[in-house]
Structures are given as structure tokens and as C-alpha cells.
Image: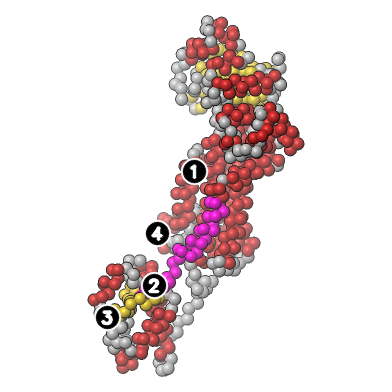
């Protein structure tokens, strides 16, 4: 135990003395949460809209006022002929054009039918989709209000409720993703690099000649990063609750326990990498390309796994972050209990033993 | 000088078809400075790794500090010190932190560490530098400090793997002075080196060629046997027979 404490102490000296490492370890989660929470969001806000309104009657004016009032749109300019549409889209500022016919209100009153054309810049298909559906919703809403005065023979009212995330906030999606990413980076990359560094410097050899058991060396290496990860889990959760206003709907204990499990999986992965490579650069490269990329791409955090081709869906099962991401979303956002995530938990535990076993086996072979 | 602390009989290590160490046999006595010479790739490091418990022999017998290399390598580790050619102190830790760490992994008590640290720093004239980062010390001091750390836990045997690489001649002399002091206090020194003038400082020298020990004696007798004026000449005469390419 004395050996172990001496080792952990030394490891903390390394970490605290290296400002850059300190910054990466403790600052990165904060920076990432803020970047993802505020800058990178797939919500569409204040998109510029152009309007062609030749009829200029009470109906179009009130419809336009409603569009302007929503936080999704900002009326940028009025155009006067359809010829201008192409030009304004080419300039790139305008994302959506709303074209009213010449006699909008008359059509509506006399023929019970009027047309509005929505033209979106689909060079970004996701944004175009979102914008047209927002605009349609506003128009439908207007229609419902004017038809309320009159009796229609049949109407079907659809009422939608967005469960768990009523405001469709992007942060609900990003917080679990960033948690997975940060824990993976800190634990896997940093442990892999520090162990390989000892190999490079020749200090690992000294340790192996010492009476300290190899397994103990490796565990002592991992303990400081486990502690730091706990700090990171805390700071991410605090930031998301108090700054991004993402609630923790489920049990905090369960959330923390699952995060620690994922941290251990990441540590085991880091150890595994460190037994396989001999230079810090290779360790860094493998951690980034081999782990960070799949985590971002295949965990479901950026792109929905359901929409991927089957081979990629199969591959995504091997990405630990996918399971952790699912767990965090269930526990944190949906507020479910352990019975809803026991399968994912079991898979992560399985991965932990697999990676750890492999790492220890490799470590022993190296010694023979 | 009669107590044998290292006993090696027909020790062999094979990596697949390649025999890195080929049936070597020798004894080292307590307090002796035993030089272990050989060209690059002759098998020195592999032999040393087997004796220090880092690597298991393929066949043969060896006892180090009274313990068997196959079954008792944990006990061997407690009784040996090791300093490698690669630098082995942490540059971003202070002198004292380095000592505390290495003494810590050998399980020394806090009180022992505190008292001995002062003693060692006094001896190295580093008392004022105890809280400085190792990074800031000149190479020669680092090397001497590394040696002091390697024998801090008072091992029976210390293995030195090319300990004086890249050090100026004056520092090398001072370093050897420390080796003599250690040997006088009863620590057996097992040292590999490239510098033939250093070989002259050893009590006994063995020269490895292609995994075998081709010659072993005191420097004086070796020079006489091979009709040479210096150890350098002895070494060249033997090494010329090598068929294995240096790596």
C-alpha cells in the first residue's frame, strides 16, 4: 500500500506540474460543454426570410406578423417580383422565401382556399427541412384561428407534445455526448500517453525491476485519472444543470455510477493501447483516430444510428460510448431507473473485463 | 570475498531460432565489481535482464542474492538495484521527490527515507538543490543522483547498464569513485560498459562474444593472456571473432 501511495503521489506531481496537461484535463470539459452548448447547435434560430407579398391585405399582414414574432424567423426583406428570388438566394443570406399570391385574402374568403409557396435553400437539407416545417406550423396555426369562427363539418386536430425535451433544445443531446467524449479523451488518451512516456524514458524498466507488482504499477497509473474524471463528471453536470439548464431527471447516484463504469472502460482501453505501442505519438494517434472519431461518429451523438447502413450499425455496437450515451440519455433526460438501462450497463461491464483482461495479458507477455 | 552472490550455470535465452545468450556460466562474489563487456548485440543486456528478473531464461540455472531466478524473482527484485543506460529519474520532479518515489516503491519507511535522503544529498553536495527540479541539474549530477537512488534501499547487488554513457571524463571518474565506495560498503556491482578504460577499474571482467562468454578474469591477467597492453586491445582481439552483426 505504501508503494501504491508513493506512486499515486508521484503521478499527481506530474499532472500538477504540467500546466498544459492540467488545462487539457480540467479545462477541456468546460470548453467543450460551452462550445457545444452555445455555439454548435442544430436548433435554427433567427433565420433570415424574404417575403413576396403582392396582395398586402389584412390576412397576409397578420400572417407575416406572426412569422416575424417567432424566434425562428427574422423578416429580412420584401421582394417585389419572382425574378428576385434566385438572386437573393444566391447571395446566401436568405434561408427561406415566402411567396403569397396576388389576392390572398379574397381567395381565402371566396374560394375557401388560398396558396402560399415556401421556397427554402436546401443546400443545407436539414436546415431547409426544419425551416419549412416551422413555417408550415405557423401558417396552420393561423388557419386554425380563422376557421374557429366558422363551423366546418369535419376537423382533425393534431396535438403534439415533445416528451422529455419540450423545447427541443440541442443541449439535451449534446451533454450526454460531450460527457462520453471528455471521459474517453481524458481517461484513454492520458493514461495511454503517460504509460508510454514511462516506457520511452526508461523509467518503466526501473519500475519492473522494482518489487512493485506490474499490475500495481498499472493500477497506480490509472487511479489519478479516475479521480480527475470524477472532477470532470461533476463539472460537466454542474455546467449542464446550471448553465445549459438541462435537468437531471433520473437518479444522480445512478448517473454517477454509470459514468464511473464508463470511466473504467476508458481507462482499460488506455491501458490496452499502452501495452501495444511504444511511442507517445502513436498512442496519441490511436486514441484520437481509433477512439475519438468513432465516438463522435458512431455513438449516435451526432448522427442517428438508425439511419446508418447496416454494416455501420453493427460496428457501432463495438463503440463503448454508444452504450454510455444511451444510458446517460435515459437516466438524465428521460429519468428512467436502472431497470431501463441494465442491458447497456451489462455490455459496458463486459467491455471493461474484456479490455482489462487483454491489457493484463499483453503486459505479462511483454515481461516474459 | 568468498560469499557468492550471483551464481550462473549454463544460462541460455532463445528468441525463436535465435540464441541471444548461449550457455553462460560465472560466479560473482560479495563486494566485487564485475565488469560485463561485449559488443552491441553480444547478449549483455539479455543476460542482465534475466539476472534482474525482467526476463525468464530458456534453460540453465541462476541464483541472485541467494534466490532462484525462475521461482523467486520477486525476492530478487527486493534485493537488487538497477540503473539503465536510458536515463531513469523524472525530470519534472524535484530531487527529493525522485528519491521519495523510488524509495517508496521499494517499501522503505518514511523515517528511513527522511534520514537517508539528507545523508545522500550531503554526500553528493546537493543539499541546497533538494527542492530543485531534476531537469535543472547538469547531466553528471543527474547520473550520480541516479546511482544513489539505485542503491538507496541498500540492495545486495546493483546492476548498472552502461551507466556512464555521454558523461565527461571527470564526471566518469567521480562516478567510479562512488562505485568503489558502494563496493566497499559490501554492495556487489555488476556493470556493463563500452569504455575500456572503465574495464580496468573492475575487479574482474567477462567478455561476451556472440552470446557466449569468451574470456573472464582480472584485467591484469586478461592482458597477460592475450598479450595486450590495454583492455581495449584485449577486447578488439576477442570481438574480431564475432560473426553476429551488431544491432
- Tell me which label, 3 or 4, sits earlier in the chain: 3
Indicate which disc residue A309 carries: 4
The percent position of residue A206, horizontal first and vertical second, equals: 60, 33
- Tell me which label, 1 or 4, sits earlier in the chain: 1
User: Which residue is more in the foreground, A12 or B169?
Assistant: B169
Q: What's the chain of the residue with tag 1? A: A
The percent position of residue B128, horizontal first and vertical second, equals: 66, 34
The percent position of residue B205, horizontal first and vertical second, equals: 59, 15
Mark 2 falls on what kind of element? Answer: strand
Residue sitting at the far right: B111
Q: Which residue is under mark 3?
A: A80
- Mark 2 and mark 1: Cα distance apart in space: 43 Å
Indicate which disc residue A47 carries: 2
Residues shaded magenta: A23-49
Indicate which disc residue A283 carries: 1
The image shows a total of numbered marks equal to 4
User: Which residue is more in the foreground, B173 or A38?
Assistant: B173
Indicate which disc residue A177 carries: none
Amino acid at each position: 500500500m505504501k508503494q501504491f501511495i508513493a506512486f499515486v503521489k508521484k503521478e499527481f506531481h506530474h499532472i500538477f506540474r504540467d500546466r498544459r496537461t492540467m488545462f487539457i484535463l480540467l479545462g477541456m470539459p468546460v470548453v467543450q460543454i460551452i462550445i457545444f452548448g452555445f455555439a454548435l447547435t442544430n436548433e435554427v434560430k433567427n433565420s433570415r426570410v424574404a417575403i413576396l407579398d403582392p396582395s398586402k391585405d389584412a390576412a397576409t399582414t397578420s400572417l407575416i406578423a406572426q412569422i416575424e414574432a417567432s424566434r425562428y424567423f427574422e423578416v429580412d426583406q420584401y421582394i417585389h417580383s419572382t425574378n428576385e428570388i434566385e438572386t437573393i438566394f444566391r447571395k446566401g443570406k436568405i434561408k427561406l422565401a415566402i411567396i403569397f399570391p396576388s389576392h390572398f385574402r379574397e381567395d381565402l374568403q371566396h374560394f375557401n382556399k388560398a396558396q402560399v409557396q415556401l421556397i427554402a435553400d436546401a443546400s443545407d437539407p436539414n436546415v431547409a427541412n426544419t425551416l419549412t416545417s416551422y413555417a408550415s406550423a405557423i401558417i396552420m396555426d393561423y388557419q386554425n384561428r380563422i376557421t374557429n369562427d366558422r363551423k366546418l363539418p369535419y376537423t382533425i386536430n393534431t396535438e403534439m407534445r415533445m416528451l422529455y425535451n419540450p423545447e427541443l433544445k440541442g443541449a439535451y443531446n449534446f451533454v450526454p455526448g460531450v460527457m462520453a467524449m471528455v471521459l474517453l479523451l481524458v481517461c484513454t488518451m492520458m493514461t495511454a500517453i503517460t504509460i508510454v512516456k514511462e516506457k520511452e524514458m526508461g523509467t518503466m524498466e526501473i519500475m519492473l525491476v522494482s518489487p512493485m507488482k506490474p499490475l500495481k504499477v498499472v493500477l497506480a497509473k490509472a487511479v489519478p485519472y479516475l479521480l480527475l474524471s470524477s472532477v470532470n463528471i461533476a463539472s460537466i453536470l454542474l455546467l449542464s444543470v446550471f448553465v445549459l439548464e438541462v435537468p437531471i431527471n433520473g437518479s444522480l447516484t445512478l448517473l454517477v455510477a454509470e459514468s464511473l463504469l464508463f470511466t473504467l472502460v476508458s481507462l482499460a482501453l488506455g491501458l490496452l493501447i499502452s501495452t501495444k505501442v511504444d511511442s507517445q505519438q502513436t498512442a496519441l494517434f490511436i486514441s484520437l483516430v481509433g477512439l475519438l472519431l468513432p465516438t463522435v461518429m458512431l455513438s449516435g451523438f451526432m448522427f442517428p444510428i438508425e439511419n446508418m447502413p447496416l454494416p455501420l450499425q453493427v460496428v457501432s455496437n463495438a463503440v463503448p460510448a454508444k452504450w454510455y450515451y444511451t444510458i446517460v440519455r435515459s437516466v438524465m433526460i428521460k429519468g428512467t431507473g436502472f431497470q431501463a438501462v441494465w442491458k447497456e450497463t451489462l455490455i459496458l461491464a463486459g467491455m471493461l473485463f474484456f479490455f482489462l483482461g487483454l491489457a493484463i495479458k499483453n503486459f505479462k507477455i511483454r515481461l516474459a | 570475498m568468498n560469499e557468492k552472490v550471483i551464481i550462473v550455470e549454463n544460462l541460455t535465452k532463445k528468441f525463436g531460432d535465435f540464441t541471444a545468450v548461449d550457455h553462460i556460466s560465472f560466479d560473482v562474489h560479495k563486494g566485487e565489481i564485475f565488469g560485463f563487456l561485449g559488443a552491441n548485440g553480444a547478449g549483455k543486456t539479455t543476460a542482465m535482464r534475466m539476472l534482474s528478473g525482467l526476463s525468464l531464461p530458456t534453460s540453465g540455472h541462476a541464483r541472485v542474492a541467494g534466490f532462484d531466478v525462475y521461482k523467486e524473482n520477486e525476492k530478487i527484485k527486493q534485493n537488487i538495484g538497477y540503473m539503465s543506460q536510458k536515463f531513469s529519474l523524472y525530470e519534472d520532479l524535484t530531487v527529493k521527490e525522485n528519491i521519495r518515489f523510488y524509495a517508496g516503491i521499494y517499501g522503505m519507511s518514511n523515517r528511513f527515507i527522511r534520514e537517508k535522503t539528507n545523508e545522500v544529498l550531503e554526500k553528493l553536495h546537493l543539499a541546497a538543490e533538494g527542492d530543485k527540479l531534476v531537469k535543472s541539474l547538469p547531466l553528471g549530477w543527474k547520473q550520480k543522483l541516479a546511482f544513489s537512488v539505485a542503491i538507496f534501499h541498500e540492495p545486495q547487488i546493483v546492476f548498472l547498464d552502461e551507466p556512464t554513457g555521454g558523461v565527461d571524463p571527470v564526471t566518469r571518474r567521480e562516478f567510479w569513485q562512488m562505485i568503489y565506495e558502494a563496493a566497499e560498503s559490501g554492495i556487489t556491482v555488476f556493470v556493463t560498459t563500452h569504455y575500456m578504460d572503465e574495464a580496468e577499474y573492475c575487479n574482474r571482467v567477462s567478455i561476451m562474444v556472440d552470446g557466449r562468454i569468451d574470456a573472464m578474469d582480472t584485467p591484469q591477467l586478461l592482458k597477460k593472456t592475450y598479450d595486450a597492453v590495454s583492455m581495449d586491445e584485449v577486447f578488439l582481439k576477442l570481438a574480431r571473432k564475432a560473426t553476429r552483426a551488431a544491432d
